[in-house]
Image (spheres, rainbow, N blue to C red):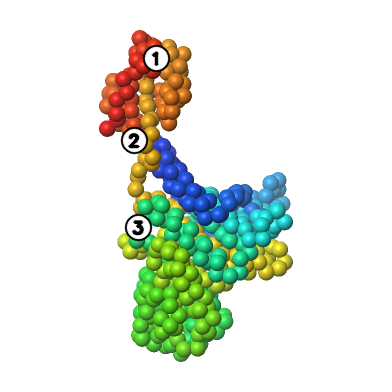
Amino acid sequence: MASPVVPPRGMRDFLPHEKAKRERALGVIRRVYAAHGFDEIETPVVEDYDRLHAGLGGDNEKLAFNLLRRGLTQADLEAAAAADDAESLADLGLRFDLTVPLARFYASHRAELPQVFRSVQVAPVWRAERPQKGRYRQFVQCDIDIIGEEGILAEVELIAATLATLEALGLEGCSVRINDRRILNAMLAVFGFGEGEVAPVLITLDKLDKIGPAGVVAELRDRGVSAASADAVEAHFAGGIGGHVPLDAEAMLAVLPAGVDRAAVDELAAIGSALAAAGVVGSLTFDPFLVRGMGYYTGTIFEIEHPEFSFSLGGGGRYDGMIGRFVGEQVPACGFSIGFERIIDLIADEAGEEHTAVVLVHGKDVAPERLLTLKSALVADDASRVRLERRTKNLGNLLNRAAAAGFTHFAQVSETTSSVADLELKPLA
């Protein structure tokens, strides 16, 4: 028996109706982002290996697909094997996100860009993930970023544009959880964690939604952190972590341990106040244990959640330290990404605005020039799409496939059909 012919694991083909739905959604996303003043850019699918593995991408760097250098010799392979250094054979890699390429793009074109640059990137990325439901090796990211704005205006614009986009896509009930890495780091210091413990502790805290407070404390103890620090976390959980807290300074301070600097708290409150005053639709809440896994975040972090789903629908945050590594000076930056592959299955499968898309069903003896003349006339008469289909024995199956592909009408063409006026357009119901 022949083996099934399928795409590589973690990658997918899209049938015409699936591709059409994705493009409609991407069109909405691009339209709303553009309306909010963001400009779309494009970067290469590959970047230099050293740039992709410069410590900017966190754990995603381990998932990068690397490309071998051209012209490798047997001696090169033997030298790499002897040194146990396979990475030396690669000089490029497929991008694993759009943030590292954006940082490189900004460094390359800074002189040509405005002082505050608002960018859109909608493009595929690649990660050597273990494929599972909702997690692919190739997937599309939809990012908006603001570079050069150090105040909360960046966060306010990003959150407003993202919520407006979700609303335009028909995703109701979405909310944004927000935190600040400065608050999170201050909490860990108050709990007594040393600097060397922060990274593994954050990994554990990031699992809070999945394993609960008891699971987090148990894992912290298994990691061998100081007993006093684990006890402090357990005591904090026992006192109630506050759940979804309004972006009000006093309400946020009430769920934080004593000793946390309130400067970042006040900034979050200001973000909430600005969005509320502007009438932005959507709920924002403070989550003191929101982590976001990327190590480059330096300030505010946020995630999109929906009451019907346990996973986030996107996220982002402030990463002021990244671009400075390319340009040699500090440049503030903040971004927000919609999880396109997660939302595409949640939005309505609608054909979009009304249009007339026609299938001309013809016999094999109808002359090609007659068919092309009819097709051209329909296109000139504002039909959005026209397709020629040779009549089959099972006309019902043919018409069903046409309807699934988004066609709205059909007409039969015979050898005596001389003009569009002779066509009897019938709806595909």
Quickly name the residue at label 1: 419
In the rendered structure, find residue 259 and report the number of the disc placed on it: none
Query: Residue 360, position in %: x, y?
Result: 37, 22
Identified at 38% across, 71% down, the residue is 209
| Circle 3 SS class | loop
Confirm or deny contact between disc 2 and disc 1 (CB under 8 A). no
Identified at 41% across, 56% down, the residue is 166
Quickly name the residue at label 3: 172
Q: Is residue 277 above or below residue 13?
A: below
Where is the N terminus found, in terms of image quarters?
Answer: top left
Instruction: Place residue 280 in its image quadrant.
Output: bottom left
| Circle 1 SS class | loop
Q: Is residue 245 above or below residue 356?
A: below
Quickly name the residue at label 2: 404
Check disc 1: other Cα within 10 Å, few if <14, some if 14-19, many if 20+. Answer: some
Question: How far apart, in angstroms, are the residues tagged by discs 3 and 2?
Answer: 26 Å
